[in-house]
Image (cartoon, rainbow, N blue to C red):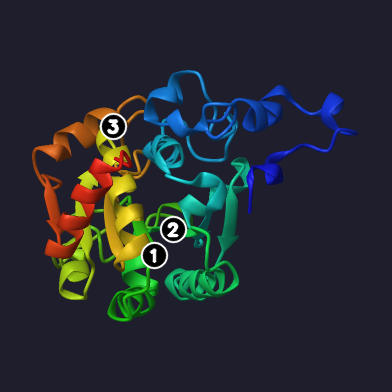
Amino acid sequence: MSVDIYKINPEFRDIMPQEIIDLEDNATWAGESVEKRGINDLTDKKEILEEHSLCAGCPEAAALRYILAALPLPEETIIVNSTGCTSLMFPHIALHTVHSMFGNQNAVASGIKRTLDWRFPDKTKDVVVLAGDGATIDIGLDYTLQSFFRQEKITTICFDNEVYANTGGQESGSTPKGQVFKMAPKGKVFDKVPMWELAVTSGCQYSVKLTASAPKKVAKVLREAVLIARELGPTYIHLYTPCILEIGLAANEGLWEMKEQDKDRFADFKYVSPEAEAYLKECKKEGLL
């Protein structure tokens, strides 16, 4: 795990598309001033290939860029992802990723984190889980909560599009009550599972619910979550990234939808344990935030 992993074989460099080269030369982790990298670099840096496999205008692609740009140590981070729309993005980035079985991503991440701590006791190694609501709340709920119970030092991010979007449009536990989809024609009959609250009652040191409408806000939350997880225990981010295709919006309407939900169902929720609060103050003093 190091920035060397991003180097293109010199023998193939002259035939590589420019956007592949840019992932090595022009990402936020590249160059001489990596200590200053961050969300402000997104205007002229590359985090993901333009021709990724998500739908045009999908908020998940933007959210992933915000997260990649905000990672405190991207070259020392492993992202564990699960089957779903999120997993379609990871072949198009240049970071360490592990694709788990559908739902067991937190179990896989726990093993990776423990192994890294044993193998590299004197180095910082971050493990971040990034999966959809189906993998986090439905299929993988037990694995997710058990990692919280065990106080695994990992950050879990749920990209919540409130539907099984890449298998036809079935409802999930995260679908809001009454929502109708192509393969859920009667509408959801019970309320959305408040995973951000379950995270608190299950032992997370930090739990936040928000949308991906504000890049700097997402970046701040991500950095806080990763730093707390390093030292104290599990952290959780519930990030609304709506499936514009399934709810009938145009490609340019995802941001509008998220801003509307900032005022409604995704109004701010943030829990920080007393220990985490004190640690964040230390991080600010040290310039880590």
* Residue 198 visible, this angle: yes
On residue 216, which mark appears?
Answer: 3
In space, the residues marked 1 and 3 are separated at their CA atoms by: 22 Å
Task: Give neighbour class at mark 2: few <14, some 14-19, many 20+ (Cα, 10 Å).
Answer: many
Pointer 3 or 2: first along the chain: 2
Please state if 251 lies on the left or on the right of 265 as rendered: right
Residue placed under numbered mark 1 in the picture? 154
Query: Where 59 sits versus 136, above or below?
Result: above
Q: Are marks 1 and 2 in contact (CB under 8 Å)?
A: yes
The amino acid sitting under disc 1 is: Ile
Pointer 1 or 2: first along the chain: 2
In space, the residues marked 3 and 2 are separated at their CA atoms by: 19 Å
On residue 218, which mark appears?
Answer: none
Pointer 1 or 3: first along the chain: 1
In space, the residues marked 1 and 2 are separated at their CA atoms by: 6 Å
The amino acid sitting under disc 2 is: Val
In-front residue for pair 239/245: 239
Q: Tell me residue 275's x, y (percent).
A: 17, 64
Q: Tell me residue 249's x, y (percent).
A: 31, 33
Outermost residue toward the right? Answer: 11
Residue name at image x 43 percent, y 41 percent: 64
The quadrant of the rendering that contains the C terminus is top left
The quadrant of the rendering that contains the N terminus is bottom right
Residue placed under numbered mark 2 in the picture? 128
Residue name at image x 74 percent, y 38 percent: 7
